[in-house]
Amino acid sequence: MAGLRRWIASAPPGARVPSNRVLTAEYGASPVTVQKAMSHLARLGLVESRPGVGTFVRAVRTAGPVDFGWQTSALGAPPNRTSALSSTQRTVAPDAIGLHSGYPAVELLPERLVRQALARASRTAAALTRTPATGMPDLQAWFAAELAASAPAGVAPATARDALIISGSQSGLSSIFRAVVGHGRPLLIESPTYWGAMLAAEQAGVVLVPIPSGPQGPDPDDVERAFAQTGARAFYAQPTFANPTGAQWQAETSRVVLDIVRRHGAFLIEDDWAHDLAIDAEPRPIAALDDDGHVVYLRSLTKSVSPALRVAAVIARGPARERILADRAAESMYVSGLLQAAALDVVTQPGWRTHLRGFREQLRSRRDLMISCLSADAPTTALETMPVGGLNLWVRLPEAAEVAAVVRECELRGLIIAPGREWFPAEPSGPYVRLNYASADPTRFAEAAGILGEVLEGG
């Protein structure tokens, strides 16, 4: 009932809200739906019920404000440009259409496998004992074997010892940037790219050097030039199903960029966050081509197993591995053995591969449906890259569109989308929004596209 929320937002405090009977007739909703909506608005503090009188738009409470000004001097200037949560981390009203999230819907996850794995893990020693700082050996071996399966003949594959188990890829990025790049040092980074990587880099005091990246990846000449001009010793990239675009590097681009990294005595920090989210292409980890320690590889299970099982791995060789391990040990000492045991249980069950096949088809179906709805109901938008994996559409708005205003107006109408600004390490190259096709109810995609289309048309 987004229309009612818009009415309340524009109504003066104390205005009487139409009765439930009137609302039922106006919106064509059932009495139960209207009652639930009114209860939700009351919990949000937007309306208040006066027994025997009616329901009214709630007046803004004007209690004296708390003064936190003293913290300005105590904290000093903020360490980075990110002063608030990403739009992808927002909690929204249950009746809103949320296309902003960075995760798939619960019904797409292997719920039965996860619940059974957690139950089994709770009955083992992992529930009561600490694990090695490097992680459970069997889970290390699984991550290493997954990468080694992609290694061509003649390349020495990664081993279990090369893998470090970490609590989610975000913590891994922080440690990698501190240990491999270093405070005040330049880091080459794709543009657009994952907002969390930029946040981790800025928290580590790393200087970002943007490299434009398109549907097939970055131009190797741009990468070569940036290494030569900046003296950077690392390049952070998502060659497989990039966030936010869903693009995959061409195989030749991967080989050429790896050669450039080697020539400059540098590192490629490969974030393989969407390894299990393939749709129209298979993952091709660049780390599988490397046996001399130039690639620091990061893979997470959070998106494909469960957000509650924050388990990931860094695969690195030589002194780089030891420095990353030292940073992780200082930060968190070790990862919960219970979570590690449950994650290993899930990915080694016969049903895991079955889940991935079904997951792939669900992602394809949702992606195609959202594209179809946008084409029909928001025709002024453009999709420059057909995502071959991942969770998102990277949608370009008309040139005259003011992204922030579009996002605000969509929210007033019950549609939550993510402004593209968050994915650019420098000025945005155009007016973009990111739409997650895996998180919301697909039966509401047409409604979402209609809202976006109306907003863009000024309706």
Image: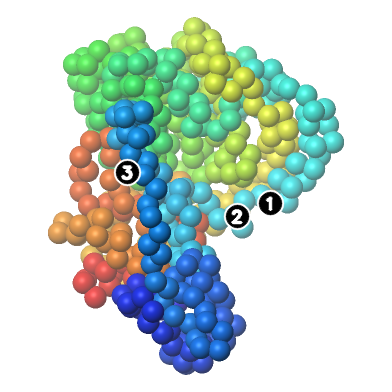
Residue visible at 58% across and 26% down in the picture: 166
Q: Residue furthest right?
A: 123
The residue that mark 1 highlights is 111
Q: CA distance from mark 2 to mark 3?
A: 25 Å
Kind of residue indicated by mark 1: Glu
Kind of residue indicated by mark 2: Val
**Mark on residue 389?**
none
Q: Indicate which disc, 1 or 3, sits on the residue closer to the N terminus.
A: 1
Q: Splitting the image into 4 quarters, where does residue 260 fall?
A: top left
Q: Is residue 37 visible?
A: no
State yes or no: discs 2 and 1 in contact (Cβ < 8 Å): yes
Residue visible at 68% across and 29% down in the picture: 336
- Answer with left or right where residue 235 lies relative to residue 291: left
Q: Residue furthest top?
A: 319
Number of residues whose C-alpha sits closer than 10 Å to that of mark 3, classed few (under 14), some (14–19) or many (20 or more): many
Judged from the image, the secondary structure of the residue bearing numbered disc 3 is helix
- Answer with left or right where residue 51 lies relative to residue 376: right
The residue that mark 2 highlights is 106
Q: Is label 2 or label 3 in front?
A: 3
Judged from the image, the secondary structure of the residue bearing numbered disc 2 is helix
Number of residues whose C-alpha sits closer than 10 Å to that of mark 1, classed few (under 14), some (14–19) or many (20 or more): some
58, above or below 30, in the image: above
Judged from the image, the secondary structure of the residue bearing numbered disc 1 is helix
- Answer with left or right where residue 383 lies relative to residue 197: left
Q: Indicate which disc, 2 or 1, sits on the residue closer to the N terminus.
A: 2
Kind of residue indicated by mark 3: Glu
Q: What quarter of the picture does the N terminus occupy?
A: bottom left
